[in-house]
Image (cartoon, rainbow, N blue to C red):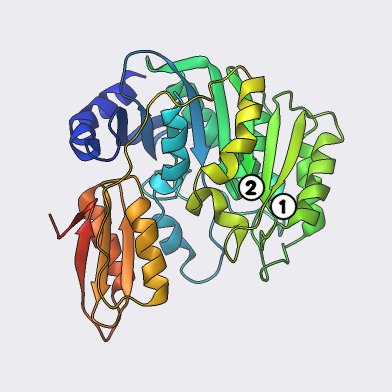
Amino acid sequence: MRILLALLLSFVTVAHAEDRGLLPGLIAAPMLLPVRISGKDMTLDSYVIRPDRPGRFPLVIMTHGTPGGGEGFFDRIARRTPISFNVAAVALAQRGYATLSIMRRGFGRSGGGYSEGLPAPCDYTSGVRIGADDVIAALAVARNEPWVDADHILLFGHSTGGLTMLAAAERNPAGVVGILNFDGGYHSFPGPGQPCGADRLVDTAATLGRTVHVPALWLYAENDQFYGPDLARQMFAAYTSGGAPARLQILPPFGKNGHDLVLEGAAGRWLSVVEPFLAELKLPTAVMIDLPEPAALAAPPSLSPGCQRAFTGYAAQRSDAKAFAVNDRGGCGYGTGRSVAEARDNAIAECSNKDTACHVYAVGQHVGEN
């Protein structure tokens, strides 16, 4: 569909302007990806980061997890954005990949309404197969674009998205050569370390592995509070029992909960494990686009310890569509978005409370509301 290219090109001028300081040599742009799912036309909220040069590049399609259920669930999924994979997407784009992060139906600004409600408690297989429909639809559109090498496609998923990518690979779609499953699982009720129906997760993994021919690399942090190493090993054994080609790597602990390592940690924490896998698939591993270190930023005065850590992460984030807000009590808000305006709004919203007004301290890599 040429609509995709037109939508992308409509953002390129903005992307070049935004990325001049932090992402020279790359194009980064929001997109509304036109797809057809279950006989209906809709768009999926997406974000692309790729080399700013002619040619076709291996494509990495990325998809996200799902927040816990309960009150406010639909508000939380509506606030999700496709830029959550920014750190990983930039690292891969530097190595010559085109990355396409997609929000499944009902998440962020994607159309179609939320579709992944389970027909019965812990019926994970049905849920991830529904999400896989979105991935397959996005893949069908993206692989036809002139900047995509349609014969070399990676599926990259986190949490629910990890299982969703295994469900997409269950169909062995054309052009897909590998899967990266980061901390794959499904809703963790009633609390950390207690997945709803752990045996059902194992059953789901076994079901998905019966027909897959695409090699997969499973990566789980040692201190994942939702799907820990023991459960990961059980799921992996079930997945490979039917002959699915895969390997499992337990990564060192990250923070208080390693579940979000791929979203919040430096890419170097997992790239050394992923690169040999990519090399076996005859995919690039060497950096082809060097990026300068982000300019140093002076931290706001009187930040709380937590906000000091947040500002360190903010300063290292390679995106101009980011903002940092503060209040007079040492509080803060760190916002990212599809645009600078959205990032400002998100930073203020995260910072604000009933008692204290907040203001934007920095936008992009500059102090002030520029």
Residue bearing the label numbered 2: 127
* Gap between marks 1 and 2 measured at Cα: 7 Å
Q: Residue at x 25, y 69 (%)?
A: 300
Give neighbour class at mark 1: few <14, some 14-19, many 20+ (Cα, 10 Å): some
Q: Secondary structure at mark 1?
A: loop
Numbered circles on residues, count: 2
Taking the image as shown, residue 362 lies to the left or right of residue 179, namely left
What x and y, as percent, mark residue 55? 37, 13
Q: Is residue 276 among the parts visible in the rendering? A: yes
- Between residues 365 and 146, which one lies in front from this camera angle? 365
The image shows residue 74, relative to residue 94, as above or below, that is: below
Image quarter (top left, top right, bottom left or bottom right) of the N terminus: top left
Residue type at mark 1: give it: Asp
What x and y, as percent, mark residue 337? 31, 51
Image quarter (top left, top right, bottom left or bottom right) of the C terminus: bottom left
Residue bearing the label numbered 1: 123
Place residue 146 in its image quadrant: top left
The residue positioned farthest toward the right in the image shown? 241
